[in-house]
Amino acid sequence: MSIKEVRFELTRLADRGVIPENRVIPLTIQTVLESAQQHFQMGYFGQFLDKELDNVRGMDASAKEAALIRMEGMILDFEKTRRAHRETHTTSDFPLAVAQVRQAASRPGFTFPESDLPKFAARRTATDFKALKGTRPGAIGHRFLPVRPEAANIEYTKFFTSEEGYTVADYALALTFTFEAYINDDLGDFTAAAADLGNVARRTRASVILDVILRKAPRVPLADGEQGPTPANLDQLAAFMSAQVDSATGRRASRRPTDLFVPTIWERKAAASMANEYLVPVGGGSGALALVPNRNPAYMLGNIHVEDMIADLLAEYPDRYAAKNIGDDDYLVVDGRNNPFELAALRGYEGGPKTFTRMVNVDETDLEGDFENRNFALKVHDVVGADLRDQYGVVIAQGD
């Protein structure tokens, strides 16, 4: 739909007395911004939102009304859009579908195709921007509950927490819809940019988790790291994880690999390295025969996830990880049995980012846009933070 068509339909409503004539231009601009909001959400949630839209369209009117009442708190950033629909006596299934998919996205395990890292993150809600102390497994000083002898006092344990803590941060970006683009009826370019902004935003939460891994997890040097996830390298990484010692308690903090996050360049090698129970000798030579074990120590070591975002973060923040010599071809080895990461979102952002629009602020006319530059705008905010919940549950493998 073009801007011209939107304005024509709203003019017809004004001619019928449904809306005042002076509301045609503001509602036209609001419809343009609503379209950008919708394209952003479709870019962010993708097929999840498509499915939810189908579910909402299948509901009867009373069920939709009841669901909207329950979901009011999930779509506060759509209030301006909903007021416009009430003013023009129209309805939209979109806000309810967004509310329901946001509710689903706030649950642990929800993730997107770009990265599986959020699947391994415990979820947490922050009420402000103050430091959140890390919560990690194994924080209690006892391994088991001790026996309490008859008539004896209860024994008190010690517990360990991170003193460093972490905070949520405001991740934000805006799009401008210029006065000239409005006059030229370039709605398609604006909505396409909004959809791409959704694609950018959906990678952010995984990048926040990956950033804390690259900053805090140990990087394990390998003699033949440039060969990637070979059986020998994977065996060395598994041995490193199994021999860790907790610095607070002095106890063994053994972990075992369950998941590998590798860049595309290593995906096939990782799969081949873990596929066969026995290693087959290659090449040849002369000399005495020797008996050598040929069992593959990396056989079925873990699940493979493709994760190319390390290279993206290195390009975005070239100096942040320089001290650890992180490389584009490095990969992660994770013990995912107990959610080794933690992802916190500010209250209200648990289900994903929010979108906001800027309308006109020129009093003389509804068309001229912002006083400073005549622009209209869409912005997105996501307020999240991450930490390692289990500092021994992930290592960075040298891949170059």
Image (cartoon, rainbow, N blue to C red):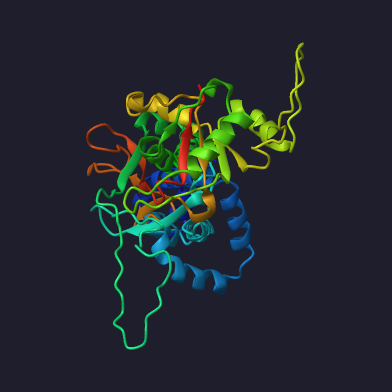
| Residue placed most toward the observer, 298 or 363 | 298
Using the image as rendered, state which of residue 309 and residue 152 is in the foreground.
Answer: 152
Residue 183 is drawn in which quadrant? top left
Q: Is residue 243 left or right of residue 55?
A: left
In terms of depth relative to the viewer, which is nearer, 372 or 10?
372
- Residue 198 visible, this orientation: no
Where residue 92 appears, as percent x and y from the top left, is 52, 58
Looking at the image, residue 207 lies above or below residue 140: above
Count of numbered circles on the image: 0
Query: Residue 355: x percent and y percent?
Result: 39, 48
In the image, 348 versus 144, the foreground residue is 144
| Residue 62 horizontal/vertical position (percent) | 55, 74
Instruction: Give the residue displayed 30% in from the left and 38% down from the top.
Output: 369
Residue 167 visible in the displayed image: yes
Q: Residue furthest top?
A: 286
The image shows residue 262 at horizontal and vertical percentages of 56, 33
The residue under the point 30% across, 37% down is: 368
Q: Which residue is the extreme one toward the bottom?
A: 151
Quarter of the picture containing the N terminus is top right
The image shows residue 251, relative to residue 200, as above or below, that is: below
- Give the residue at x 41% y 34%: 182
